[in-house]
Amino acid sequence: MGCLLSGREEIMKKLEEMNLVDDFLTYSLTSHKIYGEEASRYILGCVLQRRIGRLTVVPQRSWPGEEPGKHGVRMDVYLEEEDGEIFDVEPDNNSGDSEVKALPRRVRFYHSKIDAGNLASGEDYSVLRNVMVVFITTYDPFGYGRMIYTVRNSCTELPELSYEDGAKTIFLYTRGTEGNPPKELKQLLRYMEHSTQDNAGSAGLARLHEMVTEVKRDREVGLAYMKSCEIERRIREEGKKEGIEKGREQGRTEGKAESLLLLLSDLGEVPEDMRSRVFSEKDPDVLNSWLRAARRAESMEELVKVIVRS
């Protein structure tokens, strides 16, 4: 199942062609009523190389801003381990320079929102649960070619000082070659980027691929994808309409400015600073008032006074 965009816009990726690095598929798999917990436990087990306890999956957990106008956040895969840690798993394809540069601060914000949402009023800080944010990226976030980057807070003066605040971030680069990541994790990341039968080379991955295939065939998932495509299409169309209207308005404004300069030239040579002033004015009402004044003006000096007073 795929969805089309109007006109010449590119056809959006079909659901059956999606990989697990596409956030819609990861969200649909981990939140699935039948396969969600099993798939989430397998993925986390590969990442952490340990047995994962019973998980509660909170699909696309949202933390609103504390007050109107403040930034909120929506997390792709939010998992709570029974009597254990809290995990946020984020597949990420946003490889633009500004997005990559801001990634550490984005992670910092995610940690803060999770912590604030898990400490009730009156509770002691000691009850805060360990939180791990996991980014799975198809780009190298730091440029060292590593498959795994593990980030924790530490003391600058004494790096060997034990400073355990319960916060950890793991960046997993699907194409990384440096370091010595576990074989199971390497296979998982390869599969997440290219979620095909050929890349499901272990028993665990074969089972994961079965679940992924069933989720892609699920009618409710397909309907949710079509709905998300429709929302995306409307957003793009509205953006295009807004852009067209802005272009038309800009054209009308430039036309008024050119008409005004023609009238000015009838009164004599137009000073360069006056040309700049006319073309820098974007308010059509102001330009209209200048046009009316230009039609009545008998000298350049008279019109310049009108424009300077505006």
Image: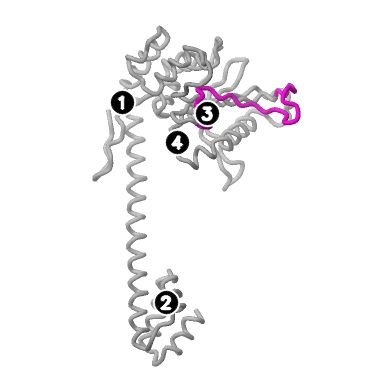
In this picture, residue 241 sits left or right of residue 180:
left
Residue placed most toward the observer, 294 or 55: 294
The mark lying in front, picked from 1 and 4, is 4
Taking 241 as reference, is 220 above or below it? above
Q: Residue at x 36, y 65 (%)?
A: 250
**Between discs 1 and 2, the one toward the N terminus:** 1
What residue is disc 1 on?
Answer: 17
Q: Which residue is drawn at 72% across and 25% down?
A: 159
What residue is disc 4 on?
Answer: 94
The mark lying in front, picked from 4 and 2, is 2
Residue 58: tell me if it is visible.
no
Q: Which residue is drawn at 45% across and 22% down?
A: 31
In this picture, residue 71 sits left or right of residue 209:
right
In this picture, residue 87 sits left or right of residue 192:
right
Within the magenta stretch, is there residue 154? yes
**Alpha-carbon distance for marks 4 and 2?**
43 Å
**Where is residue 240 drawn, in percent x and y?**
33, 51
The amino acid sitting under disc 4 is Asn
Within the magenta stretch, is there residue 199? no
- Callout 3 environment at 10 Å: few (<14), some (14 to 19), or many (20+)? few
Quarter assignment of residue 254? bottom left
Q: Main secondary structure of the magenta part?
A: loop
What residue is disc 3 on?
Answer: 144
The amino acid sitting under disc 2 is Arg
Q: What element carries label 1?
A: helix
What residue is disc 2 on?
Answer: 275
Q: Is mark 2 on a helix, strand or loop?
A: helix
Residue placed most toward the observer, 191 or 248: 191
Taking 81 as reference, is 76 above or below it? below
Q: Give the range drawn in magenta.
A: 141-164
